[in-house]
Image (tube, rainbow, N blue to C red):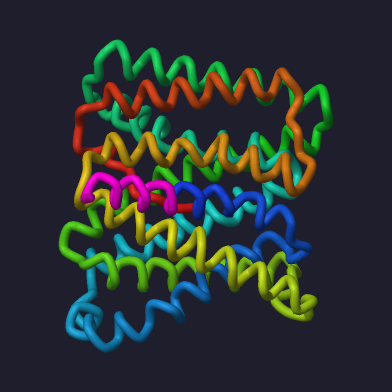
């Protein structure tokens, strides 16, 4: 029964995060506003538990630890801001695959710091980045706009990797509730300023758009995060990481069915390389420093 329950939870988590890209691509809400509201709504949703049960931990959050959490929130804001914007410029499949490279970026960072990895990890990195070149090359032949979307998705992946690296240090002395409450709140505050500077309105949307904003918050922001965080405490992080990679084909399939976004054959080939390369990295990595924490 325990195995069945784990598989069911994993399926729920994969479906929840796979809905993120297609839902946001279907909205007419400006991208920075989408990013703000999903984090803002999540912060409000976490507030009762954080303020009632973690008050001492929140009031004790200061100095270096507070700076780490704030930096993590800033990185998350960059991640969401660039990735959601990418969804308006390129396909859901391309944007999701490129942003999911964040695990590979973490490993690449560790390599630059002198960490030693096996041949499988390095081969996976090379394969994944070859996939990026294929996807970007095909998108360039389609439009410059699509290529800009690819670049923004890559930046979103780097920001997501930064969020993981900083967050892994910040969470060592913080509960998940406190950490996510402060990080989401910081992220929302940064995106609020960014939306104002960019002139992207935070209101005036049709009722159906507010419904989509609430839906993406409940599914991808809260349900997806909660399920994967629970699974990380009960099964191997390698298995969880591989499950997260299913977001790429999951998002592509949902976008194809409901949005009519069927990527060209060349893009599909590049996505397959990205997926295979990232899977190689996850399977062959045996360090604790790149233990992934979910962002969609």
262 is higher (above) or lower (below) than 30: above
Front one among 186 and 242: 242
Q: Position of residue 256 (x, y in %)?
A: 72, 39
Q: Residue at x 44, y 79 (%)?
A: 45
Q: Position of residue 253 (x, y in %)?
A: 64, 39
Give the number of callouts: 0
Front one among 248 and 277: 248
- The span picked out in magenta is 1-13
User: Outermost residue toward the front?
Assistant: 1
- 166 relative position to 203: left or right: left
The answer to whether residue 11 is magenta is: yes
Our reading of the magenta stretch's main secondary structure is helix
Q: Residue at x 37, y 65 (%)?
A: 70
118 is higher (above) or lower (below) than 13: above
Q: Residue at x 66, y 35 (%)?
A: 150
The part of the image, by quadrant, that contains residue 272 is: top right
Q: Position of residue 112 (x, y in %)?
A: 32, 26
The answer to whether residue 109 is magenta is: no
**Residue 164 is at least partly visible in this image:** no
The part of the image, by quadrant, that contains residue 91 is: top right
Q: Position of residue 269 (x, y in %)?
A: 63, 18
Front one among 205 and 153: 205
Q: Residue at x 30, y 86 (%)?
A: 51
186 is higher (above) or lower (below) than 134: below
């Amino acid at each position: 029964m325990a195995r069945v329950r784990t598989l069911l939870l994993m399926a729920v988590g994969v479906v929840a995060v796979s809905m993120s890209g297609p839902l946001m691509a279907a909205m007419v809400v400006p991208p920075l506003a989408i990013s703000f509201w999903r984090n803002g709504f999540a912060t409000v949703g976490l507030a009762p538990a954080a303020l009632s049960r973690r008050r001492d931990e929140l009031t004790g959050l200061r100095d270096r630890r507070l700076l780490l959490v704030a930096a993590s929130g800033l990185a998350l804001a960059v991640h969401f801001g660039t990735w959601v914007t990418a969804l308006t410029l390129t396909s859901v499949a391309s944007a999701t695959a490129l942003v999911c490279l964040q695990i590979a970026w973490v490993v690449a960072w560790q390599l630059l710091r002198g960490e030693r990895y096996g041949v499988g990890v390095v081969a996976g990195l090379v394969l994944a980045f070859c996939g990026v070149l294929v996807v970007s090359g095909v998108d360039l032949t389609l439009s410059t706009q699509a290529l800009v979307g690819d670049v923004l998705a890559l930046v979103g992946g780097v920001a997501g990797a930064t969020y993981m690296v900083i967050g892994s240090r910040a969470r060592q002395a913080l509960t998940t509730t406190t950490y996510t409450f402060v990080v989401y709140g910081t992220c929302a505050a940064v995106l609020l300023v960014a939306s104002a500077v960019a002139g992207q309105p935070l209101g005036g949307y049709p009722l159906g758009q507010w419904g989509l904003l609430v839906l993406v918050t409940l599914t991808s922001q809260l349900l997806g995060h909660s399920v994967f965080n629970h699974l990380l405490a009960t099964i191997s992080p390698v298995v969880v990481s591989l499950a997260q990679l299913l977001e790429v084909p999951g998002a592509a399939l949902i976008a194809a069915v409901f949005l009519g976004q069927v990527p060209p054959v060349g893009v599909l080939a590049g996505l397959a390389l990205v997926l295979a390369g990232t899977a190689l990295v996850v399977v062959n990595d045996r360090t604790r420093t790149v233990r992934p924490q979910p962002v969609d």
